[in-house]
Image (cartoon, helix red, strand yellow):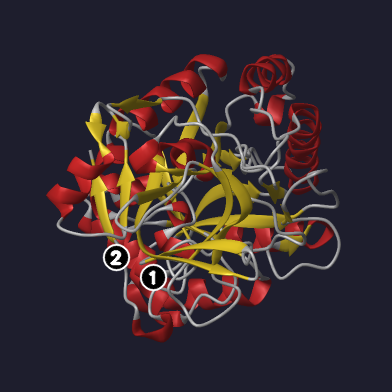
Amino acid sequence: MRPLGPIPDGFEAIDGDLAIDGRTANSLVGDAGDTPLFVYSRTLIAARIARLRSAMPQRLAIHYAVKANSYGALLEFMAAKVDGFDIASGGELAIVAAAGVSAEKVSFAGPGKRDAELEAAIAAGVTINLESLAEAHRALAIAERLGTAPRLAVRVNPDFDLKGSGMKMGGGAKPFGIDAEKVPEVIRTIVKSRAEWRGLHIFAGSQALDAVAIIATQAQTLELAARLADQVGVALPACNLGGGFGIPYFPGDADLDVEAIGSALGESFAALPPLLEGTEFCIELGRWLVGPAGVYLTRIVDRKESHGEVFLVTDGGLHHQLAASGNFGTVVRRNYPVAIASRFGAPVAEEASVVGCLCTPLDRLADKAGFPRGEVGDLVAVFCAGAYGASASPAQFLGQGPAKEMLI
């Protein structure tokens, strides 16, 4: 049998049924009307934010990365819990605006921003993290036409990356940000214009579980920010330190020590150079805040055997949970935390693979893992589904359509 990933804390069984915030999976599906269904827990999200606030220095602002989960009800909930939102498209700008998020709390990063997106962001008053000198000139020209002062920051492609990160966003040739040695020219262009200079965005990597690596990267980020400010000779109004905080998905993964990260960052803040003493600092997190608070529920519609192997075929699949299927950046496929929700906590009775309803061998949610015997009608739960599930999966593949979503 192949092991399953660790189920996050905060879940229990009620009469053999998985319970989320005291409500059984079957009752939640009944309220939603059908499966597949994503369920997100307010209680679990609030607890993670509270833990992060307690661990981090008081001056550090917490931003939410919308790309992790852009469900409207969740964004409305997050608006009262975090200090800012980071978006990566004009579409996400419209989504956060619909959720009632103030534009001055929003920053916009991402390569390839179209002129219409830049115009919408400038008109709204969003901070734009510029990804090239050409983008800076386009933004300034649009702002001049609109007769307004844009809020502009520079996204830096640092000379380092986040060691052990799932996706490296800095170091070497990258489509993201401006190479560190070219940043001073862009800053001078902004400062000489009518724009409001809003500082730096430095993001080196994502999905790291090594606190020591994150601590080292944050220290390098602060050193780079100070060096760039010194080269230009202007104070840095704000600095986004990026994120990178990972969550345990796979067998053997351990929880990230955010308390150690916060302690080290506090020491760094106590020794800042003069040009950074008045800087507003933030980190942007998506996965760490909401990932463990989400569960994907899908129903077994067929049970079959082929050459001695058991397959539990569900009405969901990779079109909603691309990452759990192993098709979202992982090199070697490993099992996410998955359980038979209708028999939660029951002993292992068989080896089975949980597969989806798509006509592709890639549609596999759990591979040869140990489960209680699953029957047609039972619910299957995929955990760690609060981030990069519905927002990062090909919902329209084979005409299947999106899953239902629910914030409880």
Q: Residue at x 63, y 62 (%)?
A: 326
223 on left or right of 91:
right
Residue designated by label 2: 94
Disc 1 and disc 2: Cα gap in Å?
A: 6 Å
Q: Is residue 364 left or right of residue 64?
A: right
Residue 319 drawn above or below residue 170: below
Which of the 4 image quarters holds residue 189? bottom right
| Res. 90 mark | 1
Q: Residue at x 13, y 48 (%)?
A: 31
Element type where label 2 sits in the image: helix
Residue 104 is labelled as: none
Label 1, residues with CA under 10 Å away: few <14, some 14-19, many ≥20: some
Residue 315 point in image, percent of width and height: 35, 67
Residue 159 drawn at (x, y percent):
85, 52
Helix, strand or loop for disc 1? helix
Measured as percent of width and height from the top left, residue 92 is found at 37, 63
* Badge 1 amino acid: Gly
Write down the quadrant of residue 309 in the picture. bottom right
Say which residue appears at 59% left-offset and 34% top-offset.
6
- Viewer-proximal residue among 336 and 79: 336
Q: Closest to the observer: 295 or 355?
A: 355
Residue type, mark 2 in image: Ala
Above or below, comparing residue 38 to residue 186 in the picture: above
In the image, taking residue 330 as reference, residue 79 lies left or right, namely left
Point 60% across, 73% down: residue? 362
257 up-or-down from 348: above or below: above
Give the quarter of the figure containing the C terminus.
Answer: top left
Badge 2, how many Cα within 10 Å: few under 14, some, many 20+? some
Looking at the image, do the residues carrying marks 1 and 2 touch, with CB atoms under 8 Å apart? yes
Please provide percent x and percent y for residue 101: 27, 48
